[in-house]
Image (cartoon, rainbow, N blue to C red):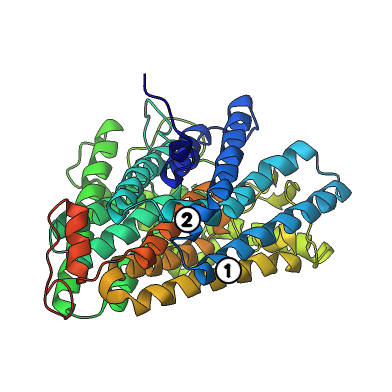
Amino acid sequence: MPKLSRSTLLDGRVLVLVVVLGGLVILQGSNNLDASKIVYFLLATAAVVGAVVSAPMWLSRTSVSTASLWLVASASLVPLLIVSLAVSRAYGTPIISWLRETSAYALLAAAPILALACAGRASRRWLVTVIAVCGALASVSFAISWIGRRNLADLPIDRLTLPSEPLAAALLAVATSLALVGLSRRWWWAATAGAVLGLFFISGTRSTLLLLAVPIGIAVFAGRPWKRAALVLLTEIAMAGAVFFVGQSAIAIANGNMSLFPLSSTATPSAQASPGLAGAPAPDPAGAPAPDRLGQRVSSVSTLITDPGSDQSFQERLEQTKSAWQAFARNPLFGVGPGYTFQWTNYANRVSSTFTLDTPLIYLAKFGLLGLIPLVLFAAAYLRLALALWRRREEARIEYLSLVGFAIVLLVVGLQGFPTEDKGSSFALILLVALGLQGLVRRDTTSELAGVSAIEGEPAVASEPGPAGL
């Protein structure tokens, strides 16, 4: 029987798989801190320790100047979390609630360390494969989860893995980048990106329409040839429409609506009673799924744009934003700490108590102005990596565009709530930063076409200087 060597156990790829795949499976359940989650976080802690132990191996492959800023950003979260414990206890928050809420930020602190450990050992092909698998699982689970929570249809399962919008959108960014830059299988990647968009739309989450900005933004940064960019975008939109139509028709037929065009049904006033732009915690009222509920949510997009004051989802978000601001105002420097119970009035005029809120202000409410220090450091490290890849864009254009795309994802998700509240955002950050870092350490002397061929499993081919893919 073969034995696992020390080098295998300290391999950054193994450590990342333990944290990311383990998290997708274990963290998909309730928000309660049960035994399986405790075991997972112990394994994740061991993975981080293993990454630190193997630091000499990956530091020798990575620019110290590039790695140092990421490590400083990671380290800056540690004192913040320690201070937050004292703050949370001062506001009467139980330690178990603090642990539950800080777990997401502990994963964020671990993300740069694991990404650095992985970058020195992983190839572009390996990372793209992992992103594709994890993103696909997150996309399908996101759609299944919200179809059930909104009572759009009766499904035998409520999720596959952790239903993470940022992680699914990371696949959208990478697939679009590969479609715009790659030669082989370009249209396969464009179809993959479109399928991810379609799954977002099937969920009935109206704010996912904003994710259209991701492929558009990547296309703008990719630049010429514009004709190819336009064709890729049209392919993605067409695929998204096809996936949405098939899924919506299947939902309508399952609910007893045999119309060939189920979206043609007129929205009723009850459509306004369905909460949730992007992550509202309350599902639709219980009962049998309405035959045209998804059609109602689609039809309500125009009302949301023209008269947001009448939309109950929008009003709930305003109430949650007010609650977060009031908590921040109580202690602007330190916030009220993770695990604090926020109270706000829902669409039924009832007081709700939740530990998180669908508003970007939730981070300031929890950590105060002091929490801005790690954010600035993470943003600086991300920008520095993106600029370094831009300078090597002839060899690392896919990595550069993927980071640009994920930055747009974070901005879009950040309009709905703070991205790190979703643990999948830390998993996506691990994989995207590792992808970017390996783009810096890869020693390709040929053109970008060699890297693209390596993804597809074809021999590397040298080409004449000039824009790749022409």
Percent x, y of residue 469: 14, 71
Q: Is residue 272 visible?
A: no
Q: Residue at (62%, 59%) from the top-left corner?
A: 74
Relative depth, front residue between 242 and 260:
242
Helix or strand or loop: what does disc 1 sit on? helix
The reply to whether residue 18 is in sight is yes
Residue underneath mark 2: 58
**Is 270 positioned to the left or the right of 338 in the image?**
left
Quarter location, residue 228:
bottom left
Give the residue pinned by disc 1: 69
Q: Mark 1 packing: few (<14 Cα in 10 Å), some, or many (20+)?
A: some
**In the image, residue 202 above or below residue 79:** above
Tag 2: amino acid: Trp
The mark lying in front, picked from 2 and 1, is 2
- From the image, which quarter does the C terminus lie in? bottom left
The first of marks 2 and 1 along the sequence is: 2
Q: Is residue 23 left or right of residue 437?
A: right
Q: CA distance from mark 2 to mark 1?
A: 15 Å
